Image: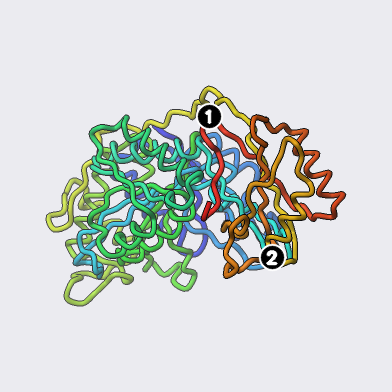
Amino acid sequence: MTKITIAKGNGIGPEIMDATIEILFSAGAKIEIEEIEVGEKVYLAGNSAGIASESWKSITTNKIFLKAPITTPQGGGYKSLNVSTRKFLGLYANVRPCKSLHPFVDTKHPVMDIVIIRENEEDLYAGIEHQQTDEVVQCLKLISRPGCEKIIRYAFEYAKQQNRKKVSCFTKDNIMKQTDGLFHTVFDEIAKEYPDIENEHWIVDIGAAKVAESPEIFDVIVMPNLYGDIISDIAAEITGSVGLAGSSNIGEECAMFEAIHGTAPDIAGKDIANPSGLLQGAIMMLNHIGQTSVAEKIQNAWLYTLEQGTHTADIYKEGTSKKKVGTKDFAKSVIENLGKKPSILNSVSYTNNSAINLPKYQRKTPLKKALAGIDVFVHWNGANPNELAEKLKSIESAQTKLQIITNRGIKVWPDGFKETFCTDHWRCRFMPTENTEITKNDIVEILSRANLKNIDTIKTENLYSFDGKTGFSLAQGQ
């Protein structure tokens, strides 16, 4: 018996949660329910987070959270509960199945059946941004080895449990060789541990085009946060069944399961909402906790119900649908069909009662880290990089020498092109002179001399090697 926390949410949330829970119990799910109040009522009672401390305790104690859609009031500094839950609970994996239901739901891709597994905590979504000059702002893209290992291992474990045959990795490591390069490297390392599952890598722009054009060639796709956010929405849209989709957010300790649609207040209380999205989230929950036989039974009954033409108003279509039903009657139909399998839609088969294996990240032996140089970023309003180079040469020392100046990543000195447009943001790389080593004291001296020369240094990046391997990018054109 697994104790779970549920929240019925707002709008159509209570109706679809009641229908979902009725199906779960009818199918024999071994769960015990603890209900909490989150969302609109809590916000309007003066809690800007939308959730009380005792509700957090329920979630962190039970570890499993099944949540209906909630309303976040506009304005007033209210925080998104979805974002807070993912961050506070360390829910590093967002899982979005995108499966077409042709011919019962219109789609241009009738055999599409893919799962997008998106890293959920880091990448550009760390939200670390700075304005550095009049003309340039930066956003830091943070990719960590723990983040890569956790999300990629989850993708392979998910594929293993779901009897899926291939995991594809999307990155842009032809350009971002350090960050996306790390993600690709870890993917290749972990893929070797799963010889029975095919693996492949795609550059993300080509991969995205293939998802839109030929999604049937993919099975499970794993990728960093930004790419996953964009492509999961594309994939959900082209299935034609966004309102029927569920998702999960998985962490080392806790997990949250939900529908991807909103609260639909215009139809709330009318017994016409489709509970399928939340039901799909609940099926993912059952798989996560190892009750895969119950999950399989419910999913096949749901597919059978759809192909029998028993549809709620949102997907009802003359000529295809046979019976229009409301929320409660749809749930009853799924319950009546428990034990049946579809004949037109593909039935599902999960690894029998096996929870997904999620070993905790184990920190590796530290690498040998050596200081190799420094990038000094300078705010300078001039246009000729040769003039800036003359200024910077005046702060060189016997140990350090100006090697290169770039502007927006393009080499502009030495031997730059006069046609290259330059902003007021310059990266100036100092490296040790021949047969010397640079130290942090040398870096302090560079910055001190720059200050004396009225050179406006706005940030620095120390350059390192790790076990003799360069840990920083070269400039375009270098």
Q: Can the viewer see residue 386?
A: yes
Residue at label 1?
468
Q: Position of residue 111 (x, y in %)?
A: 20, 59
Kindly report which numbered mark, 1 or 2, lies closer to the viewer in this rendering. Answer: 2
Q: Position of residue 43 (x, y in %)?
A: 65, 58
Q: Secondary structure at mark 2?
A: loop
Residue at 37% across, 33% down: 189
Residue furthest to the top in view is: 365
* Tag 1: amino acid: Gly
Residue furthest to the right in view is: 452
* Tag 2: amino acid: Asn
Quadrant where the N terminus lies?
Answer: top left
Q: Position of residue 48 (x, y in %)?
A: 68, 56
Colouring rule applied to residues: rainbow
Taking 127 as reference, is 234 above or below it?
A: below
User: Residue 441 versus residue 135: which sits nearer the camera?
Assistant: 441
User: Residue 425 versus residue 387: which sits nearer the camera?
Assistant: 387
Residue at label 2?
384
- Direction from residue 97 to residue 369 in the image, left or right: right
Q: Can the viewer see residue 31?
A: no
